[in-house]
Amino acid sequence: MVACASHTVQSLPEPEAVSVNGVTIPRDEIAREVQHHKASRPFEAWQSAARALVIRELLLQRARSLGIASAPRENDGGRRETEEEALMRALIEKEVATPDPDEAACRRYFEQNRRRFRSQPIYAASHILFAALRDQTDSFARAQSLANSVLAELKRHPERFGELARAHSACPSAAQSGSLGQITCGQTTIEFERALERLVPGAMTDALVETRYGLHIIRLDGKIDGEALPFELVAERIAAYLRESVMHRATAQYIARLASAAEIAGIEIAGAEAHRVS
């Protein structure tokens, strides 16, 4: 069986060279590109990398055939485009039509997705943090034991929350009796947020809440519910989203047309891959 398997591996044919209209994409270039493409198997990552470079070559060939000039720009972070990135961007701007969505389209999207357009709820919360790392078994067990004893005491005497926060919490908020002030979604860990969402003002968690920082006892001091936002406040955001969606689809279709008219060897360009420009 072992000898047979070895023979099978040795007899596999070499992968066909990848090329676009006669221009070969070097294997070492594909190998370098692989790091940017996550996949469950190495071969799938290699294919994804090869497709990305084929699409890149298609766009560059088209841009050069049209005599498009390269004018690199800087993004908001100060990063300057490469010459090739500038060429591909200029090509898309020239050849892919993306009309701006009108107000009717924006309002239609708004009406169909009203749940997305609400202000975030604001929580006033306090907590007691017992610093503990799950992989440090002994110290975690000690912190858990202390946290459970404090939690039991608070269930009997909830008015001692501030006192016990000052005495035991490993968070700087201990100096404020555990008060974190006002917080919104995204400012804490997901576990902390879920615990807050289940509480009513004045209530405390029944069990310890574990996060990457340790174990928490959490109290919700107050809450301001999120409110529905008016169309006028989100119109620009909706227009930008719809514009990007149209550009995404139109670019994918444009690349698919270029691919169908080109001579591509060594890899197949599926429609789902057409938007992945490296």
Image (cartoon, rainbow, N blue to C red):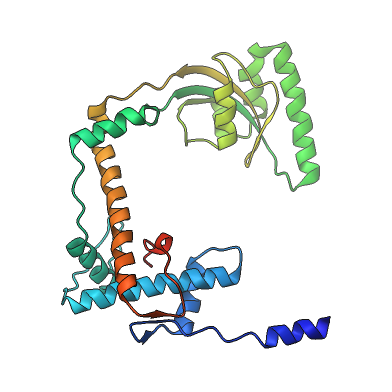
Foreground: 169 or 55? 55
Asked if 249 appears above or below 107 in the picture, the reply is below
Asked if 130 appears above or below 2 in the picture, the reply is above
Percent position (x, y) of residue 139? 77, 42
Asked if 119 appears above or below 242 in the picture, the reply is above
Foreground: 44 or 128? 44
Percent position (x, y) of residue 187? 48, 36
Asked if 256 appears above or below 8 in the picture, the reply is above
Which quadrant of the structure image shows residue 127? Answer: top right
Residue most extreme to the right: 1
Q: Which residue is pictured at 27% across the width and 66% down the height?
A: 80
Look at the image and tell me in which quarter the C terminus lies: bottom left
Percent position (x, y) of residue 68? 17, 73
Report the number of numbered marks: 0
Which quadrant of the structure image shows residue 202? Answer: top right
Q: Can residue 178 be seen in this view?
A: no
Question: Is residue 37 left or right of 4 when viewed as pictured?
Answer: left
Q: Which residue is pictured at 24% across the width and 69% down the height?
A: 86
Foreground: 76 or 47? 47
Question: Is residue 99 left or right of 120 when viewed as pictured?
Answer: left
Q: Can residue 254 be seen in this view?
A: yes
Q: Which residue is pictured at 21% across the width and 52% down the height?
A: 98
Q: Which residue is pictured at 71% across the width and 15% down the height?
A: 155
Foreground: 189 or 182? 189
Which quadrant of the structure image shows residue 144? Answer: top right
Percent position (x, y) of residue 246? 28, 50
Look at the image and tell me in which quarter the N terminus lies: bottom right
